[in-house]
Image: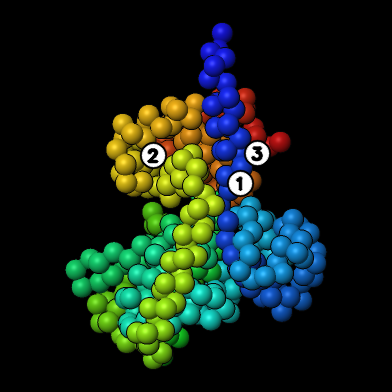
Amino acid sequence: MANMSSFPAMYMAVVTMQQYETTQLARLPLLLLDYAERQDLDRDELMRKAGLSGWQLESPDARISTRSMRNLWRAVIERLNDPILGLHVGASISAAQLGLVGYAMSYSQNLEEALNLLSRYARILSEAVQYELKRAGDTGVLIVSAHPSLVALRHPVEAGLVLISAIAREITQSGLLPLGIDLPSQMPKSANEYRSAFACPLHFNQPNAAITFSREQLRLPLKLADPTLGAYLDDLAAIQLDEIADQDSSLIGRVRQTVWKMLPDGRPDLWQTAAAMGISARTLQRRLREQGTSFSSVLDSLRRELSDEPLADRKLAVSEVAFLLGYSEPSAFQRAFRRWRGVSPARFRAG
């Protein structure tokens, strides 16, 4: 028989996990809706399919759920049937349309500072996509870590890569072309259109989406560089980021957010997660136990919730879904899925 004294803590842990969901600025679905409307799609119909109401989008700086944004992408993808939709959407957006983060990037001193700022304040734009600029010799690699369900849809990630490349040219007012682009998707039939859009070497089927810049490109000064205004916008962004962090201060929410960013790189463990959160593994283990759960339970629950979306995309093999969820072997995912749903992933897909 279960220990009844632990029931409230276990119950609260379950409720917290169910309520936690990543969010993004409403300006992102607004930009996608604007693009779709220019392609003669019905705005109201797309909003209905995404589960979005007009009041949710009244302010571009309001926040909407990742689920709604994902559903909107799905609706647009289904209606347009454009194999390079992400490239078209990304190319249609300017830095200013990203609001505070876009302006802060524009008034930075050089491209490297702007990309570091994007990495620092990406959560303001979307908690479902994170950036990290890593220096590697004479190059800098901007690594893009996206929510697995967005990676499965492909177009949102590709839109982000095109957008960053275009903004880099815009804010430097140059013909800058990255040294290379890494794409997690397999090479499509429209590969020539990709090469034309990016105009730089492309590498498909990579572990992460990424853009590589040269040291000289990172040092390019920005035409609007303004140290005073840039510092002011940096402070505003820091305040807004703190507000978002306050809204998601629960331990389990923080663990889930840390874990999902690690999934495409393999199975995250307690020690990796604790290090990323800035605490010891023993402390994290104890705090989760006090919440009536464990690290393995949080990881298992998150994977279960994330599994439905990529499995719904029949273009992805079950082995690819397993990779997105951080399993080193498809068989491990299949065993876990049978435990969750009582059927195999293939049977689940078949309905």
Above or below residue 312? Residue 66 is: below
Q: Distance between the residues labelled 3 and 1?
A: 11 Å
Q: Which of 1 and 6 is in front in this view?
A: 6
Q: Which numbered mark, 3 or 1, is in the foreground of this view? A: 1
**Which amino acid lies under the numbered mark 3 shown in the image of this protein?**
Arg
Q: Residue at x 46, y 45 (%)?
A: 254
Q: Which quadrant, please, contains the C terminus?
A: top right
User: Which comes before the other along the chain, label 3 or label 1?
Assistant: 1
What number is the disc on residue 349?
3
Q: Quadrant of the N terminus?
A: top right
Identify which amino acid the numbered label 2 is placed on: Arg
Provide residue 63's location: percent of width, then percent of height: 62, 61
Q: How crowded is mark 2: few (under 14 residues within 10 Å), some or many (20 or more)?
A: some
For the point 45% across and 28% down, the residue is 290
Question: Which element is circle 1 on?
Answer: helix
Q: In terms of secondary structure, where does tag 2 sit?
A: loop
Disc 1 + disc 2, Cβ < 8 Å: no
Image coords of residue 25 (percent x, y)? 59, 65
Q: Is residue 153 left or right of residue 176?
A: right
Asked if the residue under mark 2 is in contact with the one under mark 3, i.e. CB atoms within 8 Å, the reply is: no
Q: In which quarter of the image is residue 104?
A: bottom left
Residue 313 to residue 124: above or below? above
Amino acid type, label 1? Glu
Q: Which of marks 3 and 2 is in front?
A: 2
Nearer-N-terminus badge (3/2): 2
Residue at mark 2: 267
Judged from this view, the residue extending furthest toward the left is 137
Residue where numbered disc 1 is placed: 309
Q: Is mark 3 on a helix, strand or loop?
A: helix
